[in-house]
Image (cartoon, rainbow, N blue to C red):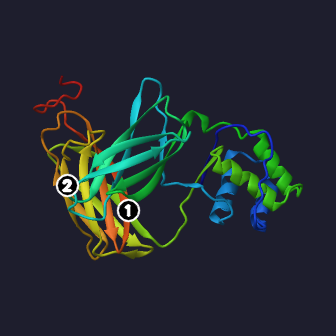
Amino acid sequence: MAIVTILVFLPILLLINHPSELVVPDWIKNNAEKLLLQNNLDEAHLALILENLSDSGIIKNAMFADSQTYDVPYKGKNAFVSLSGHVNEYGKTGTVSLEITKPDGSKEILHTPILETGHYSTVFPINYQSQKGSYKVSAEFDYKQISTTYFYLMDKSNISEKIPSWSVTIIRWWAENKITDKEFIQCIQYVIDKKILIVITNEPNISQLQVSVNGQHLVRRNTTHIITTHVAYGDHSVEGARVTLTIEKLGQDSDEEPIREFDGFTNEHGDFVFSWEIPKYFDDIETLVTYIDVTYDGSSVTKLFKFQVYCLPGEPNCKIDGNR
């Protein structure tokens, strides 16, 4: 199910010229008509209509469910957006420049070194005053752009708001044939492109490099922790994909050494199993972040896996409440 967030109220129908005629499949329009007749058009149902339009390729620029989406922190709180990736030239050293374009068009530049594995990572701080909306991150290395990614900041408290009347009105006009499919789609596309209406929908089911990561999310120090990465193309497991794994403390400075680095290749089942013993020096609850880079046949995927390490009160050098 998609998530729809209405950011501001748009009081008028804005139509834009489009070179080709747009036609909405009958089954999508029939569903909208039924919901209106039943007086049952709420946010969840509108989300479903927009998701169907997105899956059918009729509306563009919808955000996918696995996109990085963050809640704006409450006043007095700070948080960090993790930014990571890799350079496809292992063994090179240098600095990656990250140009972050904010929702209002202003830009900020971050610099972070790359590791010998080609991996780089840093964090972008956010607080309650951070702009809500879509952020574009362009990574450049050796004067060449190597990737473009996006993350989105939303105010979670606004998600449950009712759909403004203009949204229902436009759908009603469309369902009652007072406006054409083309006019309806143009209006919806306009508010999506302008970030007035944000659609977070399911990622299309296409054949591409797929990576899943599994492991314990709460691990006691001085015990064995296992992280399993599975790689597939569609329904087929991939043998021989290169997996680079880097473990760091959440929010650590870019010049700090990672806690652990390892790389290897997936087995005949498409699995890469990493096993390590949590060091004894953790004296409190710590959140660790694992950056997992997978490359295979010219494709690459980066995944983020978080877990916490803890010690028990009464153990030597344990600072958890009850033993301070």
Which sits in the foreground, 256 or 226?
Answer: 256
Labels 2 and 1: the sequence-earlier one: 2
Q: Residue at x 18, y 28 (%)?
A: 319
Residue underneath mark 1: 301
Q: Position of residue 127 (x, y in %)?
A: 45, 31
Using the numbered discs, state the Cα–Cα distance from disc 2 to disc 1 in whole angstroms. Answer: 17 Å
SS assignment at label 2: strand
Q: Position of residue 84 (x, y in %)?
A: 35, 51
At label 2, the amino acid type is Glu
> In the image, 135: left or right of 30?
left
Q: Residue at x 32, y 45 (%)?
A: 111
> In the image, 96: left or right of 102?
left
Position of residue 310 relative to residue 247, above or below, is: above
In the picture, the quarter occupied by the C terminus is top left
Q: Position of residue 128 (x, y in %)?
A: 48, 29
Position of residue 28 relative to residue 130, above or below, is: below
Residue underneath mark 2: 261
At label 1, the amino acid type is Val
